[in-house]
Amino acid sequence: MDHLVRVNAVVDHVLTHLDAQLRLDDLARVARFSPFHFHRKFRSITGETIAQFVKRVRLERAIVLLSSPERLDLTTIAIRCGFASSSAFSRAFRERYGQPPRRFDLAAHRDGHRASLDGGRLSRLDVGANPDGFTAVLEDIPERRIAYRRAFRPYSSDAVAVETERMLGWARERNLTGAAWLGIQWDDPEVVALDDCRYDVAVVVSPGLRIDDGVSEATLPPMLAAAVAIAGDVDLELRAIDWLYRTWLPLSGYLPAPPAMEAWDGDPAADADGRYRLRVTVPLVRLRR
């Protein structure tokens, strides 16, 4: 379990430093392993070498930036995703997706992944449509220390339910009654293959609380976020996400800043009536034109 915590720390570091040089020796120090043992442990836990993981998540971030209303040039996208040049980025993109980035069909890619996510049962909300009467509220959220357990393959297995029960038990043992709970969605399942997605079941904790028993920790920076409150089933949440990203965000003057989150009203579970009560929460940065 300690090894899993250490690998989680490296994953968190990579995801928040994609534009930096990510050398094996430096990442091994984050994990507190020798480079040799780090390479073996990372692959045994994640199923990828660290080099494969870094390259994959950089290219997945590039897909998100390609669809950004900022209309970024390839050099800017390459730099933001940690590639040395636009040519190196284009070459890596073609190797993975079979097409150069500017010819890549973003809409078809997202539609295919969405069909895998919901089994094709839900049609996408049209831009401007809001049949549920969603409203977005801006929230200034202070820095938070969190304890979490990571669920791998969260949308294609029962991993989230398993890790939620484990995390709830850990919290009860430490008398964290009434604490704020988050579901942190590191990956957009419309971009990332379902088996490669990660989801953190997290609880906000005090600075002095000792975190152990295979539970990881992180600090979320202060953020401005848009939040949409829902009380309903998974279909309602997917419609809220559609509305927030496709209708509200393009007119807001902001861009999403991953990861998206579920901020629960109470413990992270459905009520007796099968309804989830939470706020779909998207951190924001100001759009620069």
Image (spheres, helix red, strand yellow):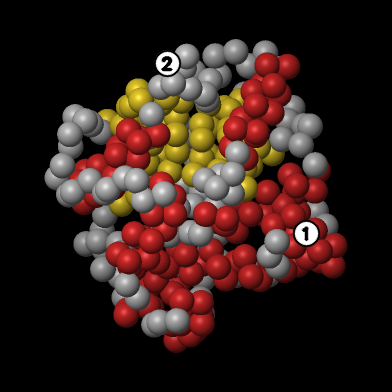
Q: Nearer the viewer, residue 141 or 107?
A: 107
Rendered view: 276 above or below 146:
above
Kind of residue sitting beneath label 2: Asp
Task: Classify 10 Å Cα crowding around label 1: few (below 14), some (14-19), many (20 and above).
Answer: few
Q: Which mark is residue 133?
A: none
Query: Would residue 245 be visible to someone looking at this image?
Result: yes
Residue at the location (35% across, 23% down)?
A: 231
Task: Classify 10 Å Cα crowding around label 2: few (below 14), some (14-19), many (20 and above).
Answer: few
Query: Would residue 219 be visible to someone looking at this image?
Result: no
Q: 250 left or right of 62? A: left
Q: CA distance from mark 2 to mark 1?
A: 40 Å
Q: Looking at the image, is mark 2 or mark 1 nearer the viewer?
A: 2
Q: Secondary structure at mark 1?
A: helix
Q: Nearer the viewer, residue 6 or 132?
A: 132
Residue at the location (39% across, 54% down)?
A: 115
Residue 215 place in picture, x, y as percent = 71, 35
Q: Which mark is residue 44?
A: 1
Kind of residue sitting beneath label 1: Ser
